[in-house]
Image (cartoon, grey):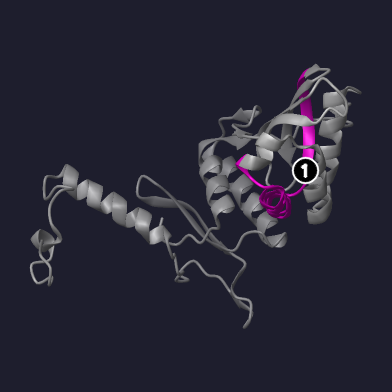
Amino acid sequence: MKRIQLNFISFAILGLLLLVVPTLAFAQDKAPSIPDTPAGRRFSEWLRLYNSGDFDAIRNFMKANYAKPILEQASADLRASNIVGASHTNGGLKIITIEKSSDHELVALLETRLTELQSRFTVKVAPEEPHIITAISNPSVPPVNARKTSQADFTKWLGGYLKRMETADVFSGSVVIVKDGKPIFQNAYGLASKAYNVPNRIDTKFNLGSMNKMFTAVAIAQLVEQGKFSFDDPVGKVLPDYPNKE
């Protein structure tokens, strides 16, 4: 996988795509109704603000409505910044289904409109007015509508998916997928240089930055498995001319 340039979110998305391929989106005429409960109303506010991408409004909502222990774990500024970034990269959220609802708790299955990532949103609110949020989470989950598909259908779907990411300006890079030593998909997207309007190509060389550390770590672990050295060996065993061999 040498010729891949991905930001953190795109890297996670591509990994998910190689495991499962979602079917076409659920056929729904309209989104499920949000229950008119204290938890439902808080969820409705959160969802509206997420889709707005308005940093100040999101931050102010969190400061006013999140319980103190939640904001001690991560500040409203940090949480709002993460939401705005995720909304820009993945698109807005839509409701697939409401899985659980009571006055003070709601669980909903959500999907991002652009990247089609699914997550399970849970919110709990205090029983007393003004029903501040006491717990909130939105972890990613495997697509509930995943299915096996043929190689031809997969590569066709993936090509369209990555093209959509390129058009939305959230992905730029070169993707090569190899099966049994042979490429089954390869294409380039976006620009290698926006300043000079140079498009990416399959053979574009990318600066991987800190991703090199992962390749190095795997290579070292493989050499240890082969018995060529151990994790406890001094640097001088591998680099005999190193000034401080010990």
Please state the horizontal and vertical placement of residue 244, each as a whole percent of the image.
Answer: 12, 68
Please give the count of numbered marks on the rendered protein.
1
Image quadrant where residue 246 sits: bottom left
- Residue at the image point whose x is 59% and y is 41% from the top: 153
Helix, strand or loop at disc 1? helix
Q: Which residues are magenta?
A: 73-100
- Left or right? Give the position of 109 relative to 189: right
Please state the horizontal and vertical placement of residue 120, each as a whole percent of the image.
Answer: 68, 30
Badge 1: few (under 14), some or many (20 or more) residues near its Cα, within 10 Å?
many
Q: Is residue 183 above or below residue 47?
A: below
Which residue sits furthest right? 36
- Residue at the image point whose x is 72% and y is 37% from the top: 111
Q: Is residue 117 above or below residue 121?
A: below
Query: Mark 1 is on which residue type?
Result: Met
Does residue 78 belong to the magenta stretch?
yes
Please state the horizontal and vertical placement of residue 9, each as a whole percent of the image.
Answer: 58, 51
Does residue 77 belong to the magenta stretch?
yes
Please state the horizontal and vertical placement of residue 12, each as a whole percent of the image.
Answer: 54, 46
Q: Is residue 103 above or below residue 49?
A: above
Say which residue label 1 marks.
Answer: 62
